[in-house]
Image (cartoon, rainbow, N blue to C red):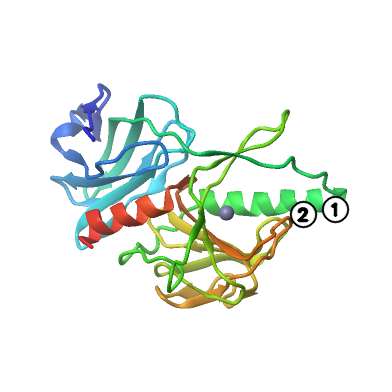
Amino acid sequence: MKIVISVLAAIFLFAFGSALQAKEFLRVKVLSKNTRPGDTVIIKLDSSYEIKEARVFTEFNRPAPCFNLDRQWYCVAGIPSAYSKKSIELMFDVKTKEPYFLMIKEEISVGKKSFPKISWPSPWPLSGQAEARVFREKEMFKIKIENSSTTFVPSGAFALPLAKIKKVTSLFGERRVRPKPHLPRIHNGVDFRAKAGTPVYAPNDGVVEISDDFYFEGGFILLDHGGGIKSNFMHLSKLSVRTGDKVLRGQIIGYSGKTGAGISAPHLHFEIWVHDTPVDTFNFIKDFNKLIFKK
Ligand SMILES: [Zn+2]
């Protein structure tokens, strides 16, 4: 898909009080071919100065860290699956070795994508206690997802969390349409059929941010892989890691199951978030591995 990039007006270089055109000092190259709702935009950053720190953000999220791999800076940004505008503006906030602050904006065209719709039952009423618990769990997740570690980076390609994928039972972005007045729910991950007790592997190195039993999610693990990229796993029957643990790609983090309220069949629900946006799991892995690790 053709990517139309236009560098917008306000580009500044603040250096000892003088404002210069940052375009000469900072180059942004969009590597991703697919920039549709749910896709991940992968960008290469280059500067004539040594970059010390870089962050990327859009109009609706907080800055996420970019990362340096083998002396090349990359930034990743997720396009929400419900995004309906024709373009998205990415802002880059860069600090270079000399105390310079560079800011650059890139407008990226967003293609069209429709997601499957399926009918879904109405939510059932929760007890006050359950409601309070769900609220607490949502808050805990939100705090973790909005804060991305800058102390480590995604150091290798991503893998799928199961040794063998037997069947994908639900795709990313599926709209679960419930009887009115309820709004459709968006499926933020992918579901794999997996009988209870199937080992679940860390898709990449990272740190365990949550390993707990959640009301709807059941046995739940959230991993931070650095660079603003996180993955999570739901309905696990057993958790093999604790919050704060470091994990290596391919390490067993737990076992699949059918835990969580309303879950009728055992499966593994797997999500990838790019900062605070859930992205198409398969497309993320494909693009990230190919564009950054040539795999
Ligand atoms: Zn699911």
Using the image, tell me which numbered label, if any, was put on residue 133.
2
Q: For the residue labelled by badge 1, is the local secondary structure a helix, a strand or a loop?
A: helix
Give the alpha-carbon distance from disc 1 to disc 2, as whole Å. 6 Å
Q: Residue at x 72, y 42 (%)?
A: 121
Q: Nearer the viewer, residue 73 or 12?
A: 73
Quadrant of picture, ligand 1: bottom right
Relative vertical location of residue 59 with respect to residue 93 in this rendering, above or below: above
Q: Are marks 1 and 2 in contact (CB under 8 Å)?
A: yes
Q: Is residue 290 left or right of residue 123?
A: left
39 lies above or below 83: below
Instruction: Pick the residue in front: 12 or 208.
Output: 208
Q: Residue at x 74, y 40 (%)?
A: 122
Marker disc for residue 36: none
Q: Quadrant of residue 111?
A: top left
Query: How far from the left and from the top, in percent, is residue 207?
Result: 48, 68
The reply to whether the residue tagged 2 has its Cβ within 8 angstroms of ligand 1 is: no
Query: Circle 1 sits on which residue?
Result: 129
Label 2 Cα crowd, 10 Å radius (few <14 / some 14-19 / many 20+): some
Between 38 and 148, the residue placed more toward the observer is 38
State the image coordinates of residue 99 (x, y, percent, origin top left).
26, 45
Residue at image location 35% in from the left, 64% down from the top: 158
Specify the quadrant that holds the N terminus. top left
Indicate the secondary structure of the residue bearing disc 2: helix
State which quadrant residue 3 falls in.
top left
Q: Looking at the image, which residue is at 25% across and 24% down? A: 8
In the foreground, 115 or 9: 115
Q: Amino acid at mark 2?
A: Arg
Q: Amino acid at mark 1?
A: Gln
Q: Is mark 1 within 8 Å of ligand 1?
A: no
Question: Quarter of the image containing the C terminus?
Answer: bottom left
Question: Residue 9's x, y, as percent?
Answer: 25, 21
